[in-house]
Amino acid sequence: MKCSELVAAYLAELPLGVILTDEQITRSLKQAVRFYCGYATLKSAPSEFERMQQQAAADGLPIPQFPAYGQGVHSPVDATNGFEGAQDFDLSASELALIKPLFDLYVELENAKGIEASRANGIEGFGRSADAVQADINARHEAMPTMSFYMGVMTI
């Protein structure tokens, strides 16, 4: 599923009580994708090193096991908050299974902050507090390296 499709599906069935704009929701997904890419590369956006390995295999050359100094080992996710062109990644089911819960938590945190800020105007808050959501995000961040780790089988 493409990232833009995921955002569109989320906006189509927007949960009750979400006060966020489309841009804030899109930014939350990009933030979750960016965090995931710190520990694993996206299948649809291989790193510079992975592309070099694929090219070596196609050319019949020995496949390098380690990247050269300064060579990119992460998916090329830019600093923008949108999903235009090459940044509209196609997430596999396993990538989506790890990114979607973090995306949901980021949206919930942003929403909780907005609701807590509205209390100054006398509006009664509802839902979990930003602190409770942040605790879940921290737990998810701590678990992400373990959940996203993959080591291919090597024959010696």
Image: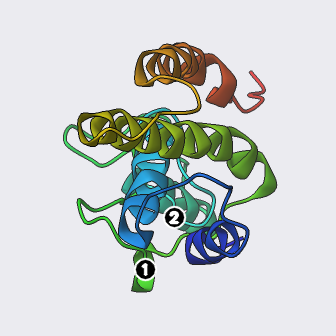
Query: Measuring 71% from the left and 51% from the top, which residue is drawn there?
Result: 96
Near-viewer residue (131 or 106): 131
Please rate how many residues cluster around mark 1, counting C-alpha atoms within 10 Å: few if below 14, some from 14 to 19, many from 20: few
Q: Quadrant of the N terminus?
A: bottom right
- Nearest the camera: 7 or 89? 7
Residue 82 % position (x, y): 36, 72
Q: Quadrant of residue 7?
A: bottom right
The disc, 1 or 2, on the residue closer to the chain's N-terminal end is 2
Q: Is residue 126 above or below residue 46?
A: above
Determine whether label 1 and label 2 are within 8 Å by CB: yes
State the residue in front, 108 or 40: 108
Q: Which residue is mark 2?
A: 45
Confirm whether residue 64 shows in the render.
no
Q: Say which amino acid is labelled 2.
A: Ala
Q: Amino acid at mark 1?
A: Ala
Where residue 53 sits: x, y (%)? Answer: 52, 54
Residue 89 falls left or right of residue 91: left
Q: Which residue is mark 1?
A: 86
* x then y, percent, for residue 48: 38, 58
Quarter of the image containing the C terminus? top right
